[in-house]
Amino acid sequence: MHARSAGRAVLVIAASAVLAVLPAMSASAHNTVVGTTPAKGATVTEQPGIVSLTTNDALLDFGENTVLQVVGPDGRHYETACATVEDATAEVPAELGPAGAYTVVWQVVSTDGHPISGEFGFDWQPSAGEAMGAGSDSAACGAGSGASAPTASGAPSTGESSQPGTVPVGDVLWIGGGALALVAAALVTWLAVRRRSAD
């Protein structure tokens, strides 16, 4: 009788622990983009100098996993260095070339450990006298923007993706924390029932 009661109590405590962990897990969501420079769909008449995107939370700086590629209407790359991260913003220096539609293909690492990616576009209509960039046939970072980086033809216009074969740091922490909570709850219940039986 005591064993059956103890089993029921363990199940109740375990279920309570899971319900307590779920809201915190759902709060650990991927970052979302809240702004870009130039603005999505904007018409730009002066060299922006910097192309950037800002998310709703700080980004993780994992070097080669942070990518911003500025691709012109001729298919050439107009970013002039590797992307950098500062708090919630990723940016890259750029010098635009011929007039037309430009696409910024990006990938950053969200606070939950997931790489997220997408693209946005703007129109470049330079004013008279604006200097033009020569561009490059390949991305500015070379190998740094290789297999794990998005491409202009393959990146989704919206949404996000995770690198295959990796377990995000945030997921590991939440799973581990939930498991520890369940074990601790079961142990406390077992000790309480054992003490009551002894009495």
Image: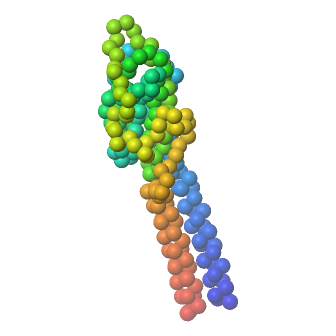
Q: Residue furthest front?
A: 137
Q: Residue at x 55, y 77 (%)?
A: 186
Residue at figure coordinates x 59%, y 91% from the top left: 197
Q: Is residue 5 left or right of residue 17?
A: right
Q: Nearer the viewer, residue 117 or 113?
A: 117
Residue 4 visible in the current orientation: yes
Residue sitting at the far top: 128
Q: Name, please, the residue furthest toward the bottom.
A: 198
Work out whether 45 lies above or below 23.
Answer: above
Q: Quadrant of the N terminus?
A: bottom right
Q: Nearer the viewer, residue 71 or 191?
A: 71
Q: Position of residue 72 (x, y in %)?
A: 44, 24
Q: At x 37% / y 34%, what residue is drawn? A: 139
Query: Residue 21: x percent and y percent?
Result: 55, 61
**Vertical placement of residue 90 versus 166, above or below:** above
* Residue 167 point in image, percent of width and height: 47, 58
Q: Residue drawn 47% across and 22% down?
A: 73
**Residue 18 vertical placement versus 40 (above, below):** below
Q: Would residue 33 be seen by someone viewing this image from the given angle?
A: no
Please, is residue 193 above or below residue 45 in the view?
below
Measuring from the top left, give residue 96's x and y in whole percent: 38, 21
